[in-house]
Image: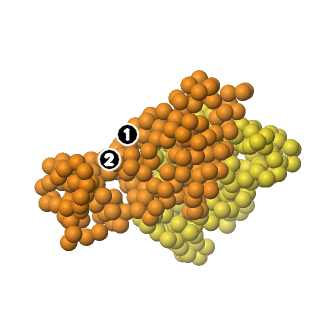
Chain colours: A orange, B yellow
Amino acid sequence: VSSVSPRVGARRPGGRSARIRDAVLAATAEVLAEAGYDGLSIEAVAARAGVHKTTVYRRWPTKAELIAETTRERSQQYVPVPDTGSLAGDLTALARAVVGNIGSEIGTNMTRTLVAASSTSREVAEVTAAFWAERLDLTAGIIDRAIERGELPARSDAHLILETLIGPLYVRLLLTGEPIDASFADRVAALVAAGATAGGRS
Amino acid sequence: VSSVSPRVGARRPGGRSARIRDAVLAATAEVLAEAGYDGLSIEAVAARAGVHKTTVYRRWPTKAELIAETTRERSQQYVPVPDTGSLAGDLTALARAVVGNIGSEIGTNMTRTLVAASSTSREVAEVTAAFWAERLDLTAGIIDRAIERGELPARSDAHLILETLIGPLYVRLLLTGEPIDASFADRVAALVAAGATAGGRS
C-alpha cells in the first residue's frame, strides 16, 4: 500500500491499461476509506496508485467519475450476482457477499464516507443513485429466475425484495453500529425468502 | 421559525421548564437539518429557541446530549410504538410512522447529517448506537405481543424483524435516493410480516 512498489507493475491480465485501471480504482477505494470524500483528490489517488496524475485525469476527469467506477468495480468483484438454483440460496449468497464487502474495514469506511458525501454533494448523490439503480436491476435476475422456477409469483416486486434483503445489513452498518456477520446475513435471507414466498400464497 | 417570536412563549402544557425543553429540542432539530452537525452549536440552538445560551448549557452541556434527547423526543412524538391488535397492523403502522418521520424534509436532513457525523465523531456514533438499542428494545413490544397472541413462534428474533422492517426505508433514504411513501411502507410491512409468520411454520 505504497507508491514505492507501484501496483501498476503487478502481474494482472489485460495489459498495461487494465493494470493502471486496477491500480487507480484500488487506490481510490483506499484513499476514500482513509481520508474520506474531502480527502479524495486526483493527486492523492495518482500518488497512491504510483501513476502520473495526468494518467488519472485523462480517464477519470472528476472525483465523481472515479467514485462511480470504483464502486461498480468493487460490487462486481465482491458481490457477484449468485445463481445457486434456489431463491433462498441466492438471497443467502447475496447477503453474505454484501456483508463481506461492506463489513470489511475498507468497505465500511467507504460506505460511510459515501453516504456522508451524498448528503452534501449533489454529484455524489447522483452517482450513488445511478449505481444503485443499475445494481438493483442487475441483481433482479435472482428474482426473475425464481419466478421462472415457480418459486415466486410473477407479480413479485424484485426491487422491494432486494431492498428488504440488504436493508438490515446497512441499518447495522450505518445506524445501530451492531456487528454484521454471515450468521446475521443468513437469518435476514431466510426471513426475506420466507416473506417473498409466502406473498405468493396470499 | 425565528427568535423574534420565541417558542418558549407558546402555550404548551408542563410549565416553563417543559416549554423551554420543547423549544430547545425543536431548535436543535432545525439547526441540525439546516446547518448539519458542524453547524450545530449551543449558541445557534439558544438563538433559534429564543433562550439564553446558559439555559441550554445548564441542561445540555454538549452537542451529543442535545442530539440524544432531540432524537429520542422526535421518535416518541412521530413514531409511537403501535398496538393495533395484529402483527401486520403493527408493522404497517410502524413503517408508515417511520416514513412520516424520516421522509419529512427536516427528518431526512437530520437523519443524513447524523449518519454522516457518526462516521467522523465517536461521540455521535455512541449516541446513535445507544438511541437505536433503546429504540429497538422498546419497539420489540410489537413482537412480544404477537408471540403472546400466537401469531409468531416464541423464538422469534424481535430485533431481526424490526431491523428488516426499517431497513429498506433507510436504504432508500440513504443509498438509492428513491422516494419513500405510505405505499412503500405498506409493501415492506406485508413482506416482513409474511416472512416472520412463515418462519414459525418451518
Q: Residue placed at 45% from the left, 48% from the top? A: A79
Judged from this view, the residue extending furthest toward the right is: B149
| Amino acid type of the residue that numbered disc 1 sits on in the rendered structure | Ala
Q: Residue placed at 54% from the left, 32% from the top? A: A143
- Residue to which mark 1 is pinned: A130
Residue A191 visible from this viewpoint? yes
In terms of image quadrants, where is residue B181? top right
Q: In this view, does A197 lie above or below B30?
A: above
Residue B185 visible from this viewpoint? no
* Quarter of the figure that contains the C terminus of chain B: top right
In terms of image quadrants, where is residue A126? top left
Q: In this view, does B68 lie above or below A193?
A: below
**CA separation, marks 1 and 2?**
9 Å
- Residue to which mark 2 is pinned: A68
Q: Residue placed at 55% from the left, 75% from the top? A: B61
Among the two numbered marks 1 and 2 on one chain, the one whose residue lies closer to the N terminus: 2
Q: Position of residue A41 (x, y in %)?
A: 24, 60
Q: How crowded is mark 2: few (under 14 residues within 10 Å), some or many (20 or more)?
A: some
Chain identity of mark 2: A
Q: Position of residue A4 (x, y in %)?
A: 20, 72
Q: Is residue A70 above or below residue B28?
A: above
